[in-house]
Amino acid sequence: MADLNAIVPGVVTELNQYVRRLTAPNPGVMTGPGTNTYIVGERILAVIDPGPAIESHVQKLIGIAGDRLRWIVCTHTHLDHSPAAEMLKKATGAHVLGMPAKDDGRQDMTFKPGRVLRHGDIVDLGRHTLRTVHTPGHASNHLCYLFEQQKLLFTGDHIMQGSTVVISPPDGDMKAYLDSLNKLLDIDVAALAPGHGHVIADPQAEIRRLIAHRLKREQKVLEAFSRKNPATLEELLPLVYDDVSPRLHPVAQRSLHAHLIKLARERRVRENGSLWERAGLAGFF
């Protein structure tokens, strides 16, 4: 068995007898070691998140799955997760499953699922099953997949190991993301297999940590207005993300925007042109 402590793009890692991981060669600031593709099943196989359209990665997947590949399943349609689906389908004849992309300029518009999955749907692997869990927030079409027999949840970008995910409006939605995290607390899960990074062995603790982190960041947004009110996104950014490297601020600004949209819906702040304002007097709204 491969060393579970190392994630090396292009190297197959056997997580157990029914799950293997092949990480795509697309490491970076947003992807960590690369996008994790999972090959799941025994006699009937599913590939979860075939990854970016990289020929060498697709050829390795074909070599691993062979003629047992029936399903190509995507968690969502960001460019590091689904573009290889069409290539893998053409090479193997496997069926593509998932939810269609919403065109916000950051999606893989080549993704055309033969079967559109909804919350609670089952992907049949013979002796095993994957059950879909709709988890909008990072993307409106984001799905997690529960390998029911092992209580292993494939989380795509809903939960990543070693990092928090970016919530990018308009398709990304902070309230939906928090609601989706809370939804997972009601599911019996033994471990999380993320789209980036290592398997997470304590799901409940990690989910609660992420919820607490987001709410703490939200509180920093509100507190920032005590120093600048009204303020632009650009003015709030260094106040709210003073614990994050400035080189990541362009990405952090997207999540800040998502926090502000959520707070505006809750009538705790208000957008006024390019400015955001927090209530300072009774009757502000």
Image (cartoon, rainbow, N blue to C red):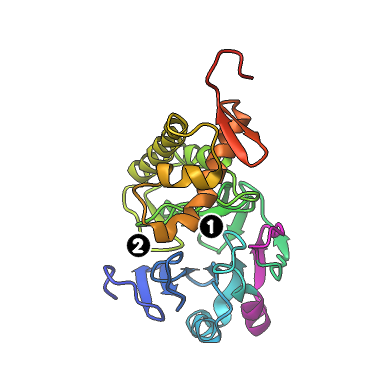
Q: Position of residue 10 (x, y in %)?
A: 41, 81
Vertical placement of 126 versus 184: above or below?
Answer: below
- Whole-angstrom CA distance, mark 1 to mark 2, is 22 Å
Q: Nearer the viewer, residue 22 or 14?
A: 22
Regarding residue 147, the answer to whether it shows in the image is no
Please name which of the two marks, 1 or 2, marks the residue nearer to the observer.
2
Q: Position of residue 121 (x, y in %)?
A: 63, 51
Q: Position of residue 111 (x, y in %)?
A: 69, 68
Instruction: Determine if the magenta segment contains residue 95.
Output: yes
- Amino acid identity at mark 1: Thr
**Mark closest to the chain's N terminus, 1 or 2:** 1
Q: Element under label 2?
A: loop
- Amino acid identity at mark 2: His
Please give the name of the residue rendered at 35% of the width and 41% of the height, measured from the top-left corner: 209
Residue stretch in magenta: 86-107
Q: Element under label 1?
A: strand
Vertical placement of 203 versus 249: above or below?
Answer: above
Q: Position of residue 86 (x, y in %)?
A: 66, 76
Q: Nearer the viewer, residue 270 or 110?
A: 270
Asked if marks 1 and 2 touch (Cβ < 8 Å), the reply is no
Please give the name of the residue rendered at 60% of the width and 49% of the height, measured from the top-left corner: 172
Label 1 environment density (alpha carbons within 10 Å; few <14, some 14–19, many ≥20): some
Q: Nearer the viewer, residue 77 or 17?
A: 77
Which residue is identified by label 1? 129
Residue 198 — which label? 2
Residue sticking out furthest to the top: 282
Q: How many marks?
A: 2
